[in-house]
Image: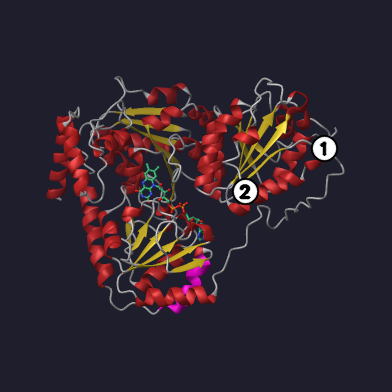
Amino acid sequence: MQEIVGEALARRLADWGVDTVFGLPGDGVNGLMEGFRRQRDRLRFVLVQHEEAAAFMATGHAKGTGRLGVCVATSGPGAIHLLNGLYDAKLDHAPVLAITGLPETSVLGSQYQQEVEATLLYQDVAAYNLAVTNPQQLPGVVDIAIRHALANRTVAHLSFPSDIQVAAASADPYRHVSPGTPSASSPSFATPLMPATHEELARAAEVLGAGRKVAMLVGIGARDARDEVLAVADALGAPIVKTLPGKQVVPDDHPLTTGGLGLLGTKPSEQAMEECDTLLMVGTAFPYGKYLPAPDQARVVQIDHDASRIGLRLPVEVAVTADARLALRHLLPLLTRQADRSFLTRHQRGRDEWRADMRALRDASRSPVAPQYLVGCLDELAADDAILTCDSGTVTTWSARYWTIRGGREYYLSGNLASMACGLPYAIALQHAFPGRQVIAYVGDGGFAMLMAEFLTAVRHQLPVKVVVNNNNAYGQILWEQIMLGYPEYAVRHQQPEADFANWATGCGGYGVRVTDPGQVPDAIRAALAHPGPALVDCLVNPNEPPMPGKIRYEQAKAFTESFLRGQPHRVATLATVARDKINQLRS
Ligand code: FAD
């Protein structure tokens, strides 16, 4: 059988080591689907319910494996639906190739059905963005697109008119582009890690050595540098403060870390930032400036492998443009061990107090269920190498504080795009990539409802993903943001009744259990985790539980009060919850 372009594309993807493609067929990609069918022994096609989920899956796959994620959608609406998940990849630096269809070349420009100018639409999101118009462009443009995505850790996009998809793949491809050939030893084209120069490291060591109160801020860019981060922090006597995506860099129970930073962070981390005289930033572009040292407070050394990301948030005295692990490994011998440990020990004490405060809010006796108790039970009962995918909302706060990284645990969220709805698609992709591991999507009712049809995808693919829904029947994060702005909440709570997601799970053919009482929480989670297939726990939690910042600032307290004076509904329930939280903390 003559090879068509669709097959040449699929074959080339497989040659690059791609084993899974997430997507949804349509009449704009029939030729590509035939190509995937012909290569089905090498490429698994994960059929989804909505293209946005396919893009999130490709992104989740790329974030979790470090390898290329691939998603496919038809022309017009399919291509449009992919966009949100692709922006998530772009903003969080995940390598993803998006493949879309176009109407056939003979009708392009005639306002044809589903004629959306995909390359124009993708101009902002894709670093490499091409409509393929000649079969001879393959396989060169596939190689180039993949190289762009991997080398720059970003999004590439190829769009194929339907007649090109079924055209004969040329036996004599156009060679001017001199495509690279993936080698068997490096099918994913790993970019060589960039080492630091001796001069950069010597200057960094000098600044760090002069500091008396040195803190480290580590982000997801230090993900492969756990041992090095710990060794350098120990040498510097520096508390390790973690960004939220960087949560998995070092275990939460390690004595050197004070946990996260920001609205969702911890009080001791915030204090370490307020007091440090020197800051070592590694693999992070933490966006919230007001949580970083004040201007002129601290000397800053920043390590990032992308020079364009250095100095985005703070004036930097020493820029080290290098891979985090290599840079830290070579920096370590240049450092003299800091003898004065008082800065570190002070913040370690603060960390112990903070943890006691957080434990006090995990109250098993409260009804409705305290969200802290739900996620606390999940944290206790999940495996030591579980992967947690989290959605955006109050669940982000609860997971930041109560999901502890220990052993080989991992944690993924839509960090910089902060999109809702990513939790379940990420989990599906990661369960495909790591079939032997426990993969849990911890989501709010709002984020889950957006792409809940993908629970069917999990059932149909017999993926044992677990979903825990923190069901407060509200857009809880926005509710609290409105209050913190000084205004009464508006249009953020749903009418009764709460959605019954457990029924949805069983209706799909999975396991579902609804929890309304705190006493049921541990058994429900145990049963879901033990279930061999997809399982969902739908827990009704207290919608009036505030995700308080680590340190409450005067303006926040003032705004909170103002919103109440301006007529905040549910005042009594909210104040009762806040008072109960405070009493629990004082008692502990
Ligand atoms: P990125 O912004 O992705 O930066 C990583 C950096 O590492 C990049 O500059 C990259 O070039 C570099 N890098 C990558 N690989 C390497 C390598 N091998 N060597 C060297 N450098 C490398 N985040 C918080 O921290 N606190 C919060 O309170 C918080 N609240 C949030 C609330 C919600 C509801 C949501 C959805 C998100 C929240 N976030 C929070 C996430 C936040 O928006 C940012 O995504 C996050 O702070 C950025 O983390 P990062 O710097 O680790 O990652």
Q: Amino acid at mark 2?
A: Ala
Q: Classify mark 2: helix, strand or loop.
A: helix
Nearest the camera: 133 or 350?
A: 133
Nearest the camera: 107 or 158?
A: 107
Nearest the camera: 513 or 133?
A: 133
Asked whether, in this view, residue 66 is left or right of residue 502, the answer is right
Residue 346 lies, with reference to residue 446, above or below; the image says below
Q: Main secondary structure of the magenta part?
A: helix
Numbered label attached to residue 347: none
Q: Position of residue 112 (x, y in %)?
A: 69, 20
Q: Classify mark 1: helix, strand or loop.
A: loop
Residue 415 lies, with reference to residue 350, above or below; the image says above
Question: Which residue does the image show at 17% across and 36% down from the upper left?
Answer: 562
Asked whether, in this view, residue 433 is left or right of residue 384, the answer is right
Per the image, the residue denoted by label 2 is: 149
Per the image, the residue denoted by label 1 is: 169
Q: Amino acid at mark 1?
A: Ala
Contact? badges 2 and 1 (CB < 8 Å): no
Lower sequence index among marks 2 and 1 = 2
